[in-house]
Amino acid sequence: MNLTIITKNPEKTKNLGKEISKIIKPGDLLAFYGELGAGKTCFIQGISLGLEIKDYVTSPSFTIINEYQGKIPIYHFDLFRLDNAEEILELGYEEYFYGEGLTVIEWAEKIEQLLPKEHLKIDIKFKDRYERTISFISQGDRFDKFLKELSKIENFRN
């Protein structure tokens, strides 16, 4: 199942993240795709607000991964500076990907071959200066159900 939502500004993108946090389950993995500045981190900030993360969420561009504690832990990967997929092997990525928290990965295309079979692909594209087209592509039954739930949210129907 696929779903596309258009957000009109960064605040709407963040609010969509908050709504998604209501559907998240421990062990979920969200793989983010999109150009630099498309809104991946903004979206993840919304998720973290919904999960009551107290820290301010930023891209962990220089550390590759940040961990945040809230209703469920968030493992935030930013692979922008990753040169090859082998670099992530040293981080023990499987403990995160198959753990009890939520794993969110910016620049997921750099490690597609390592992603679990079940995950949600989120592709964010510029529509104009503020608007974003956010495409959700289910990878597995769990995320088909996830997208059915998301499609019921009145505020984000297009």
Image: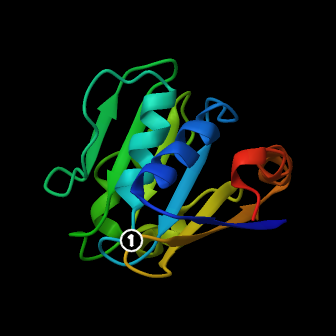
Total residue callouts = 1
Q: Is 145 on the left or on the right of 131, as rendered? A: right
Seen from the viewer's position, the closer of residues 120 and 18 is 18
- Above or below, 26 against 153 in this view is above
Q: Residue furthest left?
A: 62
Q: Where is residue 127 in the image (x, y as percent from the top left)?
A: 50, 81
Q: Residue at x 40, y 39 (%)?
A: 75
Query: Which residue is nearer to you in this view: 113 or 134?
Result: 134
What sort of colour scheme is used for the picture? rainbow
Please indicate, yes or no, whether residue 94 appears anywhere in the rendered image. Answer: no
Residue 91 is left or right of residue 33, and the answer is: left
Reply above or below: 19 against 123: above
Asked which quadrant contains residue 61, the reply is bottom left
Which quadrant of the view contains residue 56?
A: top left
Residue 62 in view (yes/no): yes
Q: Where is residue 106 in the image (x, y as percent from the top left)?
A: 39, 61
Q: In what quadrant of the picture does the N terminus appear? A: bottom right
Secondary structure category for the residue under label 1: loop
Q: Residue at x 66, y 31 (%)?
A: 22
Near-viewer residue (103 or 92): 103
Q: Where is residue 148 in the image (x, y as percent from the top left)?
A: 86, 50
Point out residue 135 in the picture as x, y percentages from the top left corner: 64, 70
Q: Which residue is drawn at 52% across and 43% down?
A: 15
Residue at 52% across, 37% down: 102
| Image position of 79 (left or right of 15) | left
Q: Quadrant of the C terminus?
A: bottom right
In the image, residue 75 sits, relative to residue 83, either above or below, namely above
Neighbours of disc 1 within 10 Å: few (<14), some (14-19), many (20+):
many
Amino acid bearing label 1? Ala
Residue nearer the viewer, 141 or 38: 38
Q: What residue did someone put label 1 on?
A: 38
